[in-house]
Amino acid sequence: MPWRACLLGRRGADPEIFAALVSPLRYCGLLEASVAACESAVALEPTIRTSIVHTWFLQRDNKRVAATKLEDNPYIAALSLAEVGRGNEAVAALRALEEKIKTRMRDFMMAARTMIEGDAEGSIAAVGRIVCSAFSDPEGLLYLTRHLAHLNQVDAALELFERVVGGGIFCYPAMSSDPWLDPIRESPQFVRLLERAEQQHQVAAREFARLEGTRILGIGTRASRG
């Protein structure tokens, strides 16, 4: 667990260490801890950058994600904009960005835009181009898993989900409750993989507790002080 070394090696109040905890805690499904790590980092260094927007996305806090700059995280920001009723705004912004960007992110943007526009075939094709490339980031593959499942591409979604869990993403709270995964939720393969993710999530939660992560990150204390 990469965040274990951060907690054990924490020296004083170091915003960089707190920022470094945001992603690995999220991967393990410790979403509240991920948010707390970001808050600790920002409290010490207000301009520090973290990946907290992805934690919000997995918490389905679409309003908060939609309030961020779309160009920073175009795929998830666009989907969140659509979820809060601002799909037209997301489509316009994505079209403008697609003309400027030629990297793999362009296919992510096209996947989001065409889905919002109701072009399922175009959206599936965009995801297919990403999957057939060298792209291997397991969190990104989790996004594509839910994307394909939402479009009822059951076999393809299950194949990707195998790679997600095998790649070390055990975000059980999101996986177990995300409505976009409902089309594959009854599959024996999904059930097996979700059980594996839950087991790893529980291992991480126990280790986090053993290392006194709640105390170190001040979880619950900000709310009580406020």
Image: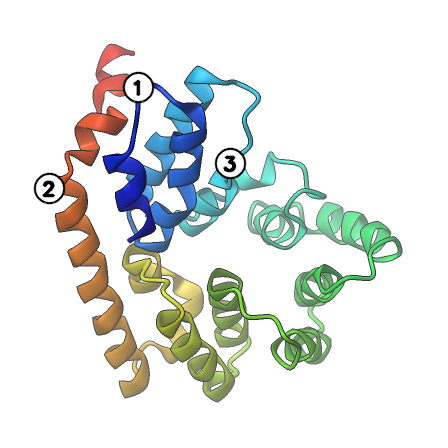
**Which residue is drawn at the image coordinates 82% and 51% (left, top)?**
97
- In the image, what residue type sits under mark 1? Gly
Label 1–label 2 contact, CB within 8 A: no
Of badges 1 and 3, the one in the foreground is 1
User: Considering the numbered disc 2 on the image, is that residue within a helix, a strand or a loop?
Assistant: helix
**Which residue is drawn at the image coordinates 69% and 69% (left, top)?**
118
Q: Quadrant of residue 98?
A: bottom right
Label 3–label 2 contact, CB within 8 A: no
**Which residue is drawn at the image coordinates 15% and 38% (left, top)?**
211
Image height check: is 156 above or below 41? below
Image height check: is 81 above or below 108? above
Instruction: Read off the residue under disc 2.
Output: 210
Instruction: Read off the residue under disc 3.
Output: 50
Image height check: is 212 above or below 183? above
Q: Of 226 and 103, which appears nearest the observer? A: 103
- In the image, what residue type sits under mark 2? Arg
Q: Of 161 and 41, which appears nearest the observer? A: 41
**Alpha carbon of mark 1 to alpha carbon of mark 2: how far?**
19 Å
Query: How many numbered dots are placed on residues in this image?
Result: 3
Circle on res. 12: 1
Q: Residues within 10 Å of mark 2 (few under 14, many from 20)?
A: few
Quadrant (top left, top right, bottom left, bottom right) of the C terminus: top left
Of badges 3 and 2, the one in the foreground is 2
Residue 25: give x, y in percent of width and height: 33, 46
